Amino acid sequence: MTECVTLITGASAGIGADLARVFASHGHRVALVARREERLQALAREIVTGGSIAPIVIACDLAKPDAGDVIAAALSAAGVEIDHLVNNAGFGLFGCAAELSRDEQLEMIAVNVSALTDLSLRFADHLIRHRGGLLNVASVVAFLPGPRMAVYYASKAYVLSFTEALHNELAGQGVRVTALCPGPVPSEFQARSGLKAGVDSPALAVSTKQVAEAGYRGLMRNKRVVIPGFGARMVPLLLRFVPRGLVLAAVGRLQRGRGKTAD
């Protein structure tokens, strides 16, 4: 019988690292994917020290067009298949879309959208064969238009829509599919995207560990969408009662004060 693993992208820090810890603590052997191999090796040692099965480490840049091939080759060389796939890798950039680097924004799409789609489709046959699960990490911003983070918000809207569709399509084949939509969490994301630290409402924030635990529980229960935290769960609910134009204007005003160099 072929050994199965849980593949987790963006596992070197933040939500991804905590997702690896949570899956490992529930008996899954994890395969860790990210660019920073030293971070992955350190996490792998931590997981082994905690009594879990030794992870597979795959150092890979998901922005590269051959990332899926690299991951597939590494799994084949290890003689394993995927029974659970966690597409967590992603990043954002703060600023007006027309003023930010076009290349960096296209790289964001490559990681947040293209790589996630590639891996979801590439390993769908594994998930079906092993009646496993797919957890795609979107964001609560998937429900919103995003002035000053236009491409990031749009990429997460794609993740949510794509994942909800797969939840429906794969249900009859025994595959659990969940979109995880956290609010802001304290992580490296803010520094990478150019956001001020500490500007997000405490009512929306939860820890990366809480997000990871909620995502795991939701996937195992085959929940279509998981939004950790009471405050974040109120966002899509309130949007039902507010015209889209007003939401757009409100988000635009809020975003003006979020950059490291506010207008």
Image (cartoon, rainbow, N blue to C red):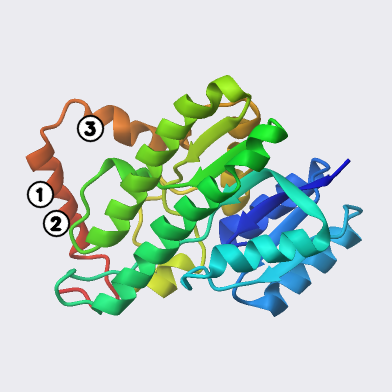
Tell me which numbered mark, 1 or 3, is placed earlier along the sequence: 3
- Classify 167 as above or below 139: above
Q: Secondary structure at mark 3?
A: helix
Which is nearer the eye, 181 or 120? 120
Tell me which numbered mark, 2 or 3, is placed earlier along the sequence: 3
Q: Secondary structure at mark 1?
A: helix
Which is nearer the eye, 204 or 174? 174
The answer to whether residue 129 is seen in the rendering is yes
The residue carrying mark 1 is 249
Question: Which numbered disc covers residue 239?
Answer: 3
In the rendered image, residue 24, in percent from the top left (x then y), is placed at 78, 49
What is the quadrant of the C terminus in the image? Answer: bottom left
Amino acid carrying mark 3 in the image: Leu
Q: CA distance from mark 1 to mark 3?
A: 13 Å
Q: Residue at x 34, y 32 (%)?
A: 234
Question: Which numbered disc covers residue 221?
Answer: none
Q: Residue at x 52, y 70 (%)?
A: 66
Residue 140: image quadrant is top left
The residue carrying mark 2 is 253
